[in-house]
Image (cartoon, rainbow, N blue to C red):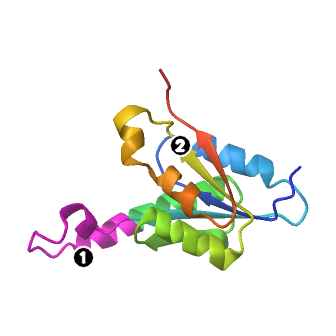
Amino acid sequence: MSDYKNILLALDLTEDAEQVITRALSISQGEGSTLHMIHVVEPISFAYGGDIPMDFSTIQDDIQQQAKQQLSALGLRHNIPAEQQHIVLGRPETEIHNVAEELNADVIVIGSHGRHGLALLLGSTANSVLHGAKCDVLAVRVGTTN
């Protein structure tokens, strides 16, 4: 059991999500604990810097709808109610911090690929969440390591 009552589980909806969910569920077993899930969809314009004169709104809507369906399926599989599932548009680290503050989260659980070398210098979402969070952050190592 843990002392964490408000847990925010940040997911990227990859195949590694199950490993991160399992860890979050293990710390949310205490009486009165609430587990929320969040997935942040980055605006397509972030990837292209707004330099391409195209309307991406339909594609962006499709991406958000697909993410909502995936998060909903995970919530259903792990008994996490729809009102505790959050799909947000924006920069992942910023939106995870915002939702954690709104929920008064005690801990953020996030997957980390344990990058090394240049990838580590460039940073990662988990690293950005860790350094800006006002609560504890549990980085769950996922993926293969060499």
Q: Is residue 98 left or right of residue 47?
A: right
Q: Which residues are magenta?
A: 42-64
Q: Residues within 10 Å of mark 2 (few under 14, many from 20)?
A: some
In this rendering, the answer to whether 100 lies above or below 71 is below
Question: Which comes sooner in the sequence, label 1 or label 2?
Answer: 1
**Residue 13 belongs to the span the image colors magenta:** no
Q: Residue at x 63, y 70 (%)?
A: 100
In this rendering, the answer to whether 90 lies above or below 127 is below
Q: Residues within 10 Å of mark 1 (few under 14, many from 20)?
A: few
Q: Is residue 76 left or right of residue 63?
A: right
Q: Secondary structure at mark 2?
A: strand
Q: Is residue 135 left or right of residue 53?
A: right
Q: Residue at x 89, y 49 (%)?
A: 1
Looking at this view, name the residue that lies furthest to the top. Answer: 146
Label 2 sits on residue: 112
Q: Where is residue 84, by image quadrant? A: bottom right
The answer to whether residue 82 is seen in the rendering is: no
Three-letter amino acid code at the position of disc 2: Ser
Label 1 sits on residue: 57
Q: Position of residue 89 (x, y in %)?
A: 41, 72
Nearest the eye: 9 or 105: 105
**Residue 47 belongs to the span the image colors magenta:** yes
In this rendering, the answer to whether 124 lies above or below 92 is above
- Between the C-alphas of marks 1 and 2, the distance is 30 Å
Q: Position of residue 144 (x, y in %)?
A: 49, 27
Q: Position of residue 21 (x, y in %)?
A: 65, 48
Q: Which mark is residue 82?
A: none
Q: Position of residue 125 (x, y in %)?
A: 46, 54
